[in-house]
Amino acid sequence: MNAKEQIAAAKQSFEQSFAAGAFYNKQTQDADHLQQILSFLPLKSEMRVLDLGTGSGYLAFALAAAHPDIEITGLDIVEQALDVNRKRAAREQLANLHFVSYDGMDFPFADAAFDLVVSRYALHHFPDIAHSIGEVSRVLKPAGSFFLSDPMPNPCDTSGFADAFMRLKPDGHIRFYGKDDWIRLCGGSGMILSGGFGSIIRFPRKRSAENEYETLISQYPREVVESYDLQIAGDEIWITERVNNLLFRKTT
């Protein structure tokens, strides 16, 4: 599939998941990690912040509630989620929080529109990551910052096991990137690494009746599979993944 087809497939999957009441954000909520991010971000009064791949607004709502003097915009392809987010923002009287939909490729904002772009657990779904990082840089003001939080493969996983495991669910997973990948990608769009921290996430996948999991693990070295501390609980398989939490600064 090309990038547009991948985006359409991911959007359909997320819309269906949301309609079924099992929206993906429920699986990635982590109060400690959220607090780490809020404490780490270089926030200042009257900033304009873009939350890229906002989903159900897990990070956006926390930012807006904690910083009423900062304007937050959540951007995503999942329109049903954004509609619910708008109603919740109105209900909670968060006048500094807005939500915008887009086509998954080009950001619908002017150049240098934001002081800070943030993205949590979304970037591995982006089919043309270089283009999206270029868009991040474009909408950032000079000396603006980009914070990303996204899982990464283990050092021993050079054959793509974690990516294959995540694709057991058809939600548009494309690829996890390592720290060096992010430095290269962001460097190509005029951004340099200025800080970061590490964390982990435990993430579930449903076990299918077709034994996809058993077939998958038979194709990869045992030490690679075991490095992710896979555990089976009922009809779910849980994987432990390390997470990059990186802050970049725009230099051009």
Image (cartoon, rainbow, N blue to C red):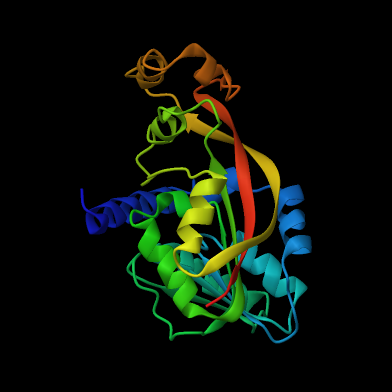
Residue shown at 41%/51% (left/top)? 125
Residue 56 position, x and y percent, is 54, 60
37 shown above or below 142: above
Is 157 in front, or is 90? 157
Picture layout, residue 183 above or below residue 145:
above
Image x and y of residue 170, in percent: 34, 40
Q: Nearer the viewer, residue 137 or 180?
A: 180
Count of all numbered marks drawn on residues in the image = 0
**Residue ID at (51%, 20%):** 224
Q: Residue 164 placed where, x, y %?
A: 39, 31
- Residue 55: give x, y in percent of width and height: 50, 60
Q: Is residue 79 above or below residue 239?
A: below
| Residue 3, image quadrant | bottom left
Horizontal side of residue 97 vs 62, given as left or right: left
Give the residue displayed 54% in from the left and 55% down from the top: 183
Looking at the image, residue 133 sits to the left or right of residue 180; the answer is: left
In this rendering, does residue 53 appear at all?
A: no
Front residue (pair 231, 224): 224
Q: Is residue 88 visible?
A: yes
Q: On the rendered structure, is 143 left or right of 108? A: right
Q: Is residue 212 above or below residue 52?
A: above
Residue at 39% from the left image edge and 57% from the top image edge? 129
- Nearest the camera: 175 or 20? 175
